[in-house]
């Protein structure tokens, strides 16, 4: 079997609004064993159960939510010959492609909103073997249409950015006589009101974990936990490439205290808040060379002052952020970690004239992205 089942009975739900439910089943699917499909065998089986016409009455009443943890760097085009991924000219992210109302596909940078045409061949090697990777709401909707001949309601922050808009959408869909399929990004972790769901699928439960951010595990935990607790639904399928990762497991166990115990160990070992202060200095410049020179100079000056003030435990390192280039500017970080950074930052900020040199300082950084 390629999944684990976590069941929760009524007793563990007494403190929630959904105490009337008798049982919740959370299936955690190991997707490393099913790399070639977007939907696992298990998800497929359950979708068939609720959406196939042959299952007569079920089809009329079923409601299914599919949550796509979309990130702007998680889809795009890739050349299968040379591996080239078309990127935005001004930002170091892949261009993602969307079908617009006219049926035409356009490329869009989710950071600077630059638009691009869909290339017919690879811009690097001219091969025609250039294909989409990743999956997002529109693609899932196309799949549901093709396999089950059903329309879907797409809920994403661009179209449904408030609870009111979602309610409007749900009131439209609630009049449909066919099965109701909602497809959405993280905004769908808050369920549309007044609908009892038969099935909730997380297409990729751990996309948020792949970013260098010490709060990523916590965000990922609540991404799942909130949906588990808020949905009036008995069956959840969680597809993950990291089924042993603690934020995913503790969410499936609905165990907040276990999550925080693990997260504290991680943060303490890696000197992250609340065990250390974290300060992130960001520098941006259109000219890559100039950026490196500036960052390197400041880095050396900080190391010198670290020695001068005798702070052997202070960690200082420079690193590129998750998105190296944005709006045409190259970016680099200097990270400082230490039990108490306040005094050191007060002194160095003035002494090294960081503000006038264009360094942006986040003294209580919550994230290192
Ligand atoms: Zn190519
Ligand atoms: Zn861009």
Image (spheres, grey):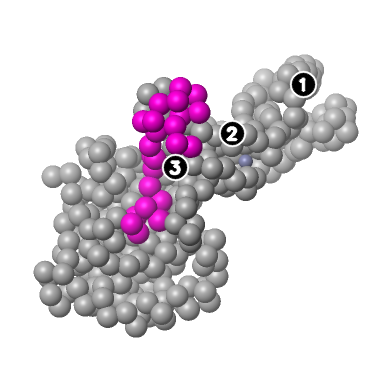
Along the viewing direction, whichever of 321 and 180 lies nearer the viewer = 180
Q: Residue 326 sits in which quadrant?
A: top right
Label 1 beta carbon within 8 A of ligand 2: no
Question: Which residue in the protein does label 1 denote?
Answer: 290
Along the viewing direction, whichever of 207 and 175 lies nearer the viewer = 175
Question: Which residue in the protein does label 3 denote?
Answer: 75
Q: Residue 237 sits in which quadrant?
A: bottom left
Q: What distance separates the C-alpha of mark 2 from that of mark 3? A: 13 Å
Residue 6 placement (x, y as % from top left) = 23, 56
Along the viewing direction, whichever of 15 and 245 lies nearer the viewer = 245
Magenta span covers which residues? 119-142
Left or right of 249 in this view: 334: right
Residue 130 placement (x, y as % from top left) = 39, 33
Residue 87: mark = none
Q: Indicate which label's residue lies in the foreground, 3 or 1.
A: 3
State the quadrant of the C terminus.
top right
Question: Which residue in the protein does label 2 denote?
Answer: 92
Q: What's the residue at 48%, 78% (across, down)? A: 168
State which tag comes first along the sequence, 3 or 1: 3
Left or right of 265 in this view: 7: left
Left or right of 37 in this view: 69: right
């Amino acid at each position: 079997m390629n999944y684990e089942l976590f069941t929760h009975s009524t007793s563990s739900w007494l403190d929630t609004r959904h105490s009337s439910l008798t049982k919740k089943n959370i299936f955690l699917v190991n997707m490393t064993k099913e790399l070639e499909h977007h939907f696992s065998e298990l998800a497929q089986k359950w979708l068939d159960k609720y959406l196939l016409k042959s299952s007569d009455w079920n089809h009329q009443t079923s409601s299914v939510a599919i949550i796509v943890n979309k990130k702007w760097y998680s889809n795009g085009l890739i050349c299968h010959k040379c591996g080239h991924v078309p990127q935005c000219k001004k930002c170091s992210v892949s261009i993602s492609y969307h079908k617009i109302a006219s049926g035409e596909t356009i490329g869009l940078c989710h950071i600077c909103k630059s638009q691009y045409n869909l290339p017919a061949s690879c811009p690097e090697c001219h091969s025609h073997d250039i294909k989409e990777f990743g999956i997002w709401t529109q693609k899932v909707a196309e799949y549901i249409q093709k396999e089950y001949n059903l329309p879907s309601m797409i809920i994403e922050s661009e179209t449904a950015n408030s609870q009111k808009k979602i309610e409007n959408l749900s009131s439209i869909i609630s009049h449909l006589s066919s099965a109701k399929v909602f497809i959405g990004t993280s905004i769908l972790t808050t369920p549309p009101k007044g609908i009892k769901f038969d099935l909730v699928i997380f297409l990729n439960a751990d996309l948020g974990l792949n970013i260098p951010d010490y709060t990523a595990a916590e965000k990922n935990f609540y991404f799942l936990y909130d949906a588990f607790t808020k949905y009036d639904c008995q069956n959840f399928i969680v597809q993950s490439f990291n089924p042993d990762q603690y934020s995913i497991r503790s969410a499936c166990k609905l165990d907040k205290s276990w999550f925080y115990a693990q997260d504290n160990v991680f943060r303490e070992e890696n000197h992250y808040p609340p065990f250390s202060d974290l300060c992130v200095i960001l520098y941006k410049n259109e000219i890559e060379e100039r950026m490196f020179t500036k960052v390197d100079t400041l880095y050396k000056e900080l190391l010198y002052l670290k020695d001068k003030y005798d702070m052997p435990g202070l960690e200082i390192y420079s690193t590129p952020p998750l998105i190296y280039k944005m709006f045409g500017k190259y970016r680099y970080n200097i990270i400082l970690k230490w039990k108490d950074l306040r005094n050191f930052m007060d002194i160095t900020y003035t002494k090294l004239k960081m503000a006038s040199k264009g360094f942006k300082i986040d003294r209580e950084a919550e994230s290192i992205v």
